Amino acid sequence: MTILYSLTAVEKTYRGREREVRALRGVDLEIEQGDFVTIQGPTGGGKSTLLQLLGALDTPTGGSVSLAGSELGRASAKQLGALCASEIGFVFQGFNLIPTLSARENVSMGLEPLALPRADREARVQEALAHVGLADRADHRPAELSGGQQQRVAIARAIAKRPRVLLADEPTGNLDERTRDEIMDLLERLNADGLTLVLVTHDSAVARRARRRLRLDHGTVQDITVPATSRQ
């Protein structure tokens, strides 16, 4: 067992002019390399805050967050940027594609921070698009693609950097059930190949597909995983 993330007594407090908001309250959590974890919970329960900490986009107010042994709270902005660029892939509900660029160009944009040689960059783009089944749509712009195809481009952009972990925030939220299931099939194949998945979702049908299910409410985490033998 290799621990990828280790969170100890993590607190996150946002201070406004009139009040404080404790988004996370003493969270202890470990996520193994190669795991598939979903996070559910009510709006405002801390899910997005937790995902930002896992993605090195923010640092905790208290406690510690480590990724592969590196303490994120003690890292410099430059070090955090390097981690985001090389170790962590992101996928969002809104796809976040640049409408004037082709699928190939959108995926390539995600590799810019790595400063790869041109040949290596092009090879990674082609490999990633093929991996998500869009090699024949490489020259299409987002408006020429379905919602599911756009999300596949977003996933290709995330995996082209060959990250340790893919963090997904409601990646199927804008999709119909059939397309949702196709995207989840794709994510499960990536996980089977060794990619760690951490996915925030309101959809219990999505959450049930994970090996590990967490519920985040009022800043505290509860493991609600159902044993494999008990799943329907």
Image: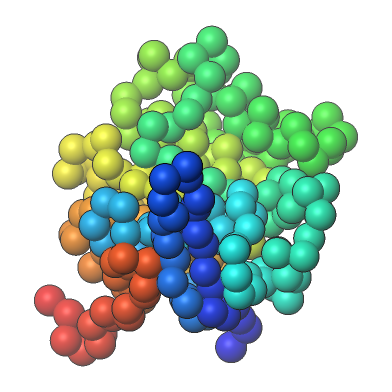
Relative side of 13 to 68, left or right? left
Number of numbered discs visible in the structure rendering: 0
Task: Pick whichever, 157 or 62, lies toward us.
Answer: 62
| Quadrant (top left, top right, bottom left, bottom right) of the N terminus | bottom right
Q: Residue at x 36, y 74 (%)?
A: 221
| Res. 222 image quadrant | bottom left
As drawn, which residue projects farthest toward the top? 100
The answer to whether residue 200 is above or below residue 221 is above
Its colouring scheme is rainbow
Apparent side of residue 56 relative to residue 214 in the rendered image (left or right): right
Q: Nearer the viewer, residue 8 or 189?
A: 8
Residue 90 showing in the rendered view: yes
In front: 79, or 4? Answer: 79
194 above or below 49? Answer: below
From the top left corner, tell me how far across and down residue 125 is, in percent.
65, 35
User: Where's the C terminus, which quadrant?
Assistant: bottom left
At a point 69% along the width and 40% down the height, the residue shown is 124
Rendering coords of residue 52 (x, y %): 53, 53
Q: Position of residue 47 (x, y in %)?
A: 38, 57
In the picture as drawn, the residue positioned furthest to the front comes out as 18
Q: Position of residue 218 (x, y in %)?
A: 31, 65
Residue at the image position 67 percent from the left and 28 percent from the top: 109
Query: Which residue occupies the foreground of this view, 9 or 16?
Result: 16
Q: Residue at x 53, y 19 (%)?
A: 98
Quadrant in the picture for residue 225:
bottom left
| Residue farthest left in this picture | 232
Q: Is residue 91 visible?
A: no
Image position of 149 (left or right of 134) = left
